[in-house]
Image: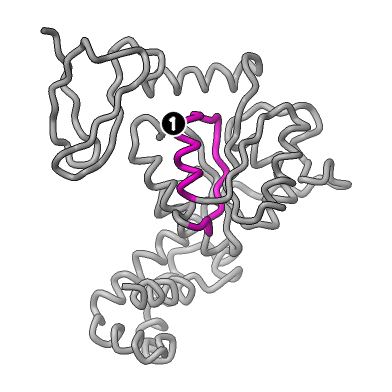
């Protein structure tokens, strides 16, 4: 009997699957080693991830075909409705969900063109959904925008969990058109500079791509520098987390790290915010949770 070899994408355990059980759509298997659930596709299935990615690319470049669908996962129903109404005006079918588990199940079922996820979704956060999607072969081709209340923290979270775009909530409502274009979805003329209320009176000035790249570099460097700082001062850091005085207790180490950090980042970026302080506080909060 002809068979296929399927491997769990999480732990790489291999399984033999009889081809007689295969259809055009995927079958689901549960890994006995790690309990992960994954999909197996027939070699010529039009639903296999590579075929889906190619179809998404053809649809976004041609502007034709069926109506593109975008999942909007937001804990605030009013925000989700505003965004959904704007997408509908542009010929995009919005799928609104307000819970993380509901969001990932909807994405698995609908295979949307893109997903816009609130970092603070209940049950399963937007970051957790993003990580799950990027590790899942059948979902990794779907672009994801991660939306948070604070741009700096969302940038860090998005980088950690491989989101394609990160933005704060004001940017979501003010520059929705640019976001949708950034996710690879074609828009009608005039939509690029629109927010949820329609065209802006004056298009926002486009930022310097080099400066955006410098911000990303600064965020990544801050994570590395602070991780080293914590690693080499672990007892002191843990005590400071318990006492709730991390910034005071680690002041000397932070000052030394800042001199190294400032020598390697664009001064314009460094003047915008205190990357090291924010990262140290983030790791302190992470330490409290664990």
Percent across and percent down for residue 173 are: 72, 50
In the image, 144 versus 70, the foreground residue is 70
Q: Is residue 72 left or right of residue 128?
A: right
| Quarter in which the C terminus is drawn | bottom left
Percent across and percent down for residue 60 are: 59, 22
Q: Is residue 113 left or right of residue 254?
A: right
Extreme right residue here? 201
Extreme left residue here? 1
- The residue depicted at 58 percent of the width and 31 percent of the height is 184
Percent across and percent down for residue 26 are: 33, 22
Residue 215 shows up from this direction: no
Percent across and percent down for residue 205 are: 75, 49
Quadrant in which residue 63 is drawn: top right
Q: Is residue 169 left or right of residue 29?
A: right
Q: Is residue 117 magenta?
A: yes
| Quarter in which the N terminus is drawn | top left
Query: Which portion, as a residue range, is magenta?
Result: 100-122
Q: Is residue 285 left or right of residue 56?
A: left
- The residue depicted at 45 percent of the width and 42 percent of the height is 104
Quadrant in which residue 284 is drawn: bottom left
- The residue depicted at 77 percent of the width and 34 percent of the height is 191
In the image, 124 versus 181, the foreground residue is 124
Q: Residues within 10 Å of mark 1 (few under 14, many from 20)?
A: many
Extreme top residue here? 1
Quadrant in which residue 263 is drawn: bottom left
In the image, residue 31 above or below residue 118: above
Residue 200 shows up from this direction: yes
Q: Is residue 210 magenta?
A: no
User: For numbered disc 1, what is the local secondary structure?
Assistant: loop
Q: Which residue is mark 1?
A: 141
């Amino acid at each position: 009997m002809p068979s296929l070899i399927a491997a769990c994408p999480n732990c790489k355990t291999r399984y033999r699957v009889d081809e007689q059980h295969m259809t055009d759509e995927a079958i689901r298997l549960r890994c006995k080693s790690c309990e992960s659930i994954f999909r197996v596709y027939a070699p010529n299935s039009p639903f296999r991830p590579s075929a889906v990615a190619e179809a998404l690319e053809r649809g976004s470049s041609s502007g034709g075909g069926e109506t593109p669908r975008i999942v909007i996962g937001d804990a605030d129903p009013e925000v989700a409705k505003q965004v959904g109404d704007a997408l509908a005006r542009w010929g995009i079918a919005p799928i609104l969900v307000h819970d993380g588990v509901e969001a990932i199940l909807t994405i698995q079922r609908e295979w949307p063109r893109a997903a816009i996820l609130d970092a603070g979704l209940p049950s399963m956060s937007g970051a957790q959904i993003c990580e799950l999607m990027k590790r899942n072969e059948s979902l990794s081709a779907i672009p994801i925008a991660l939306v948070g209340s604070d741009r700096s923290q969302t940038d860090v979270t998005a980088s950690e969990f491989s989101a394609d775009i990160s933005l704060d909530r004001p940017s979501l409502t003010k520059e929705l058109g640019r976001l949708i274009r950034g996710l690879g979805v074609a828009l009608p003329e005039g939509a690029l500079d629109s927010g949820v209320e329609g065209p802006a009176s004056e298009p926002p000035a486009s930022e310097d791509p080099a400066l955006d790249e410098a911000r990303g570099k600064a965020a990544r460097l801050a994570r590395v520098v602070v991780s080293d700082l914590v690693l080499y001062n672990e007892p002191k850091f843990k005590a400071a987390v318990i006492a709730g005085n991390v910034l005071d207790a680690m002041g000397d180490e932070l000052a030394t790290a800042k001199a190294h950090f400032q020598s390697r980042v664009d001064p314009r970026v460094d003047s915008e915010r205190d990357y090291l302080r924010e990262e140290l506080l983030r790791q302190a909060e992470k330490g409290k949770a664990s």
